[in-house]
Structure formats: structure tokens, C-alpha cells
Image (cartoon, rainbow, N blue to C red):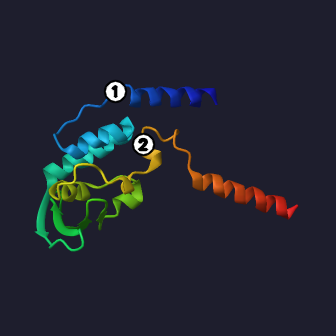
Amino acid sequence: MDKQRNETKRLNHESTSGKPTTVIKFFLEDDAAELYTREIFYKVQDEIVAARDYMRIQTIGPEINGIKCYEMRDVKMKDMIFKVEVSKTHANCSCKKFLLCGILCRHAFCALNHFEVFKIPRRLLLNRRMKNAESKPSSKVVVSNEILIWRLYLRK
């Protein structure tokens, strides 16, 4: 248990002791460097670099209710067309990487950059991926624990 605590302290210090080096000059990359742990930042950074290098926007739909639809191709996957819906506060891609991995995909980063969003939408940030994940208690967990305790109490 002490080994795990020491490792957590070391990783927390590493994440908060400085800002990781950014490769490209996207505002989204700077924002990611401020928000994510180092390990997650480097994964996100790979997606941001791939958005710049490998994504080609095929069509851009009209903006309806603040949402713009993009269709794009990934140079590495020639037969695939990805559909991304973007607003100032949200991004949704047909590849579903966010649902599977908890980080945005290159398609979403490409669309967000084109839509001139300079900060990663806060709705798309998972607490467990953030630098300050431990310092944010989740009220949902507290409530569910209280319900669980009451249920166990009533069963007695």
C-alpha cells in the first residue's frame, strides 16, 4: 500500500511540477497540457498531431443551432469517412473513441480546430484523466454510498 501511495505522489509531483513540451501551436494542445496528466497528455498530443497531419476535411455542413457537421477522411484509413458534429461546448465523432478510451479522437480535434474552439470542451473531460483528479470528490459517489449503507442497514 505504501508503494502505491509513493507512486501516486511521484506521479502527482511529475504532473504538477511543470508543463510538458508542446509540439505544435494549436491552442487545444496548450489547454491539454494544462489539464491532463503527463501520460494522458502525450496520448492526446498524438491525436492532436495526427489531426494536423492526417485529416482531410471532405465536406462542411451549414451551422444549425450552433452545431456544424464535418465529414473527413483519415489519410491512413483511405476507405473510411468520419462524421463529426461540433459546437463550442461539445464534439461527437462517428469513430466513438471518446466513449471507448475517454479522450477525444483526431477527427474531433481537427473539427474543433477548424471551428475555432480554443479550449477543450469541459463536458468532454473525465475527472480520472485530469491532473487534479484526487482533489475533486464526486458527490455522486457519496450519495450512492449513503444509499448503499441505508440499504444494508434496512436488511438487518
Sequence order check, earlier mark of 1 and 2: 1
Q: Is residue 37 visible?
A: yes
Q: Which mark is residue 77?
A: none
Identify the residue shown where x is 80% and y is 59%: 152
Closest to the observer: 33 or 47?
33
Identify the residue shown where x is 42% and y is 38%: 131
Name the image quarter holding residue 92. bottom left
Circle 2: residue type: Met
Q: Which residue is mark 1?
A: 18
Name the image quarter holding residue 146. bottom right
Q: Circle 1: is it few (<14), some (14-19), or many (20+) Cα within 10 Å?
A: few
Q: Position of residue 24 (x, y in %)?
A: 17, 39
Q: Which residue is mark 2?
A: 130
Circle 1: residue type: Gly
Identify the residue shown where x is 24% and y is 42%: 29
Identify the residue shown where x is 22% and y is 49%: 118
Q: Position of residue 143 (x, y in %)?
A: 65, 56
Q: Position of residue 94 (x, y in %)?
A: 29, 68
| Image position of 32 (left or right of 114) | right
| Image position of 70 (left or right of 143) | left
Under circle 1, the secondary element is loop
Q: Position of residue 48 (x, y in %)?
A: 23, 48
